[in-house]
Image (cartoon, helix red, strand yellow):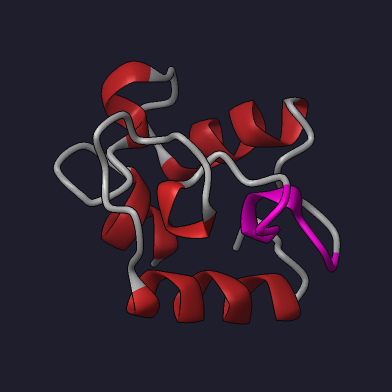
Amino acid sequence: MLFNKYLTIGTIGNCNFCHPGGSPSQLYGYLQGRGYVGGANPSLTSPSKSCLSWYGGNMPQGGPTSNAQATTDMNAWAAAGGQNN
């Protein structure tokens, strides 16, 4: 759900536009390899470590500086264990 709503091409995250990973599993593996996802407190949802602009990061370039719904959804995903499911 998060991939289709926030991370794929044409969404507010638009991660797949610049980064490799044509599927949710491939993008998850890409982010996991960089230490952004997995476990109860993935850095992808950390206000001090996230690359996502709605957490204060710089991705996507020129992206939204805040998005309350995205933050809520990503935090719920992190609270559920931040897994690839």
Q: Residue at x 60, y 63 (%)?
A: 85
Is 57 left, or right, of 40 in this rendering?
left
Residue 34 found in image quarter: top right
Is 36 left, or right, of 1 in this rendering?
right
Q: Quadrant of the N terminus?
A: bottom left
Q: Position of residue 35 (x, y in %)?
A: 79, 35
Q: Position of residue 24 (x, y in %)?
A: 45, 44
Q: Residue 20, relative to residue 9: is it above or below?
A: above
Q: Position of residue 28 (x, y in %)?
A: 59, 40
User: Residue farthest to the left?
Assistant: 10
Q: Residue at x 60, y 81 (%)?
A: 76
Q: Is residue 55 magenta?
A: no
Q: Residue at x 75, y 26 (%)?
A: 33
- Magenta segment: 40-48
Q: Residue 37, relative to residue 19: is it above or below?
A: below
Q: Position of residue 51 (x, y in %)?
A: 56, 39
Residue 68 found in image quarter: bottom left
